[in-house]
Image: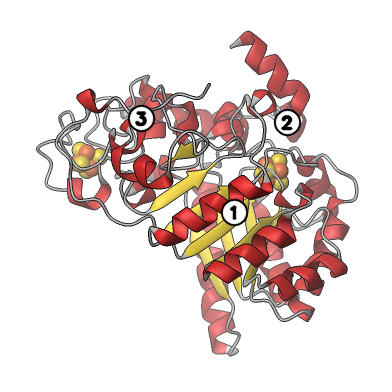
Amino acid sequence: MHSTGSNLAEVPPKPAVGLPLWLLAELTYRCPLQCPYCSNPLDFAAQGKELTTEEWFSVLRQGREMGAAQLGFSGGEPLVRQDLAELIGEARRLGYYTNLITSGIGLTEQKIRAFKDAGLDHIQISFQASDAQVNDMLAGSKKAFDQKLEMARMVKAHGYPMVLNFVTHRHNIDNIDRIIELCVALEADFVELATCQFYGWAQLNRVGLLPTREQLERAERITNEYRARLAAEGNPVKLIFVTPDYYEERPKACMKGWGSMFLTVTPDGTALPCHGARQLPVAFPNVRDHSLHHIWYDSFGFNRFRGYEWMPEPCRSCDEKEKDFGGCRCQAFMLTGDASNTDPVCGKSPRHDVILKAREEARTATAGIGQLTFRNARNSHLITKKG
Ligand code: SF4
Ligand code: SF4
């Protein structure tokens, strides 16, 4: 039985609530790859039964009725769901703008065509590196790189706007020039050069993944040089560079505020205000037990960190709280043990020392790719048993 997540007695006075404009449908935690920076929960292999096609239809319908406009299909690898084309078709019928977030493994030209016919707007393919050897080591598959290249070309040939996503970290960030060259050659419209965000498996492997400040600054400088050069050549590709919080003095405005516009539904129907929130010691509701309306407006989980009443000092009296909402609740929990603490990324946090320590660890780390813990069912079961 899923938790009801509706202990309203503990809910602080309700702040004004926005619409759940952005719905993320995590269709499955199954995935043929095993990226050591995957943001899926460590215990993904022990999660409950996936929602059925009909249950997803209901989620999509309710979301649209509540104002959701953007819909991302992600996972795990959403392509392992045999009903993906049906779900895309239903989303189109309801009027969503849809995005498929995929590793490209399991994609075929036939599927690309079928998804187009069903009304898919956008495909984002993720790569692990700019060369086959590193890519396939990180992905845990010998054929991944060639398949991704072929599918990226195919996606473009079928007229989709294409986003290529590279998660960067200390083992691939020094090749940022080769990554950008590859994206230009593949005629990507948008390129996300996203330094690892440390949730799930990435947090477990943080010491082996966090780049040094020097690596990061070099990569950003090279990206800026490419931006200028490509713009001068009239190339419309957009390069988006995302830095990790660990080298900032202020946290990001996580999810633009808790329960303010993002709603994630996980494979077993648990509803979350952000895809990392499952690890928090908060009772989150399930779409099998409650309407999306109840979940968004009335559940304990979605109200827990809304507004400003929940904040401790120094956030409570800080004049920046409307900018960053005290930062990321998951990061506060992972790094301080209390989700209501100020995100330690903030220089004003009394626990900012953990960030300084992580920077120092990155400076002196020597571990190779082989020492990372890969995201697979075996490791997930081992971690769950230990936990
Ligand atoms: S990050 Fe890697 S392992 Fe995780 S879902 Fe995506 S492709 Fe699979
Ligand atoms: S103290 Fe809190 S509200 Fe102020 S800048 Fe830091 S995280 Fe943001």
Q: Which residue is mark 2?
A: 374
Name the amino acid type tagged 1: Phe
User: Do the residues bearing badges 2 and 3 touch, measured as CB atoms within 8 Å?
Assistant: no
Q: Residue at x 80, y 60 (%)?
A: 148
- Counting residues from the start of the chain, the first of labels 3 and 1 encountered is 1
- The label nearer to you, 1 versus 2, is 1
Residue 176 in sight here = no
Label placed on residue 298 = none
Label 2 or label 3, whichever comes before in sequence order: 3
Foreground residue among 138 and 302: 302
Badge 2 density bin: few <14, some 14–19, many ≥20, Cα 10 Å:
many
Q: Quadrant of residue 100?
A: bottom right
Label 2 vs label 3: CA separation? 24 Å
In depth, the one of 57 and 178 nearer the eye is 57
What number is the disc on residue 57?
A: 1
From the viewer's perspective, is residue 44 above or below residue 213? above
Categorize mark 1 by other alpha carbons within 10 Å: few (<14), some (14-19), many (20+).
some
Mark 3, residue position: 332
How far is mark 1 from mark 2, CA to CA? Answer: 33 Å
Q: Where's the C terminus, which quadrant?
A: top right
Q: Earlier in the sequence, mark 1 or mark 2?
A: 1
